[in-house]
Image: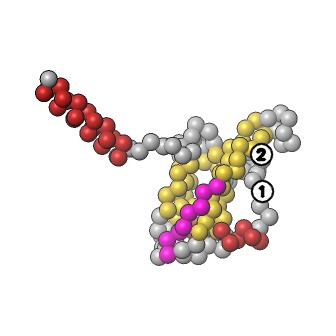
Amino acid sequence: MKKLATYFVILILLGIIILIVFPPLDQPIAIDVRPSKLVLFNNTIDTLQYAVFERNALRSIDWEPCDHPRLCSDSRIRPGLMREIPYELIHRWHPGAEVIVYWWLLEPDTTAQNGYRLDGPYEVTVATPRKALPGT
């Protein structure tokens, strides 16, 4: 009986270690803030479209998500892959700025204007480092 309890404790500890080392991917898009760039990870089985803006720049931009894959070709992340966005490519970015990452999914829909329906856009706001290292 004591041996069984020992194995049970070992299994529980092993499970906890696995969850710490490999956390579940519960968000469709994961954002890693690095010293010189944002890294977006697509945790889905679908291609995701994205756009990134400095928070205050949105006041002067009339932005809408693209609604056809040909229009979004430069701003997509294929399933299970990542995209790096250097801070210097984000309009009006400065060290310590908050940026908003929008993401959405294009689903084929013959009744939609361009043949695709948007699932989203969804948004996540992240703060960039105050001591960012652009260009590295």
Vertical arrangement, residue 41 with respect to residue 2, above or below:
below
Does residue 82 appear in this view? no
Q: Are marks 2 and 1 in contact (CB under 8 Å)?
A: no
> Comparing marks 2 and 1, which lies closer to the viewer?
1
Q: Nearer the viewer, residue 29 or 133?
A: 29
User: Label 2 amino acid?
Assistant: His
Residue found at x 49% / y 75%: 130
Q: Which is nearer the eye, 131 or 120?
A: 120
Question: Does the magenta-highlighted stretch encompass residue 32?
Answer: no
Query: Do we see residue 108 in this rendering?
Result: yes
Task: Report the predominant secondary structure element of the magenta stretch.
Answer: strand
In the picture shown, does residue 64 fall above or below 112?
below
Q: Residues within 10 Å of mark 1 (few under 14, many from 20)?
A: few
Few, some or many residues within 10 Å of mark 2 (<14, 14–19, 20+):
some
Q: Residue at label 1?
A: 64
Q: Which mark is residue 68?
A: 2
Front residue of 52/127: it is: 127
Q: Residue furthest top?
A: 1
As drawn, which residue projects farthest toward the front?
1
Secondary element at image label 1? loop
The residue located at (22%, 34%) in the rendering is 9
Q: CA distance from mark 2 to mark 1?
A: 12 Å
Image-quadrant location for residue 40: bottom right
Q: Left or right? Give the position of 34 relative to 120.
A: left
Which sits in the foreground, 128 or 79?
128
Amino acid type for the residue under numbered disc 1: Glu
* Quadrant the N terminus occupies: top left
The part of the chain drawn in magenta is 123-130
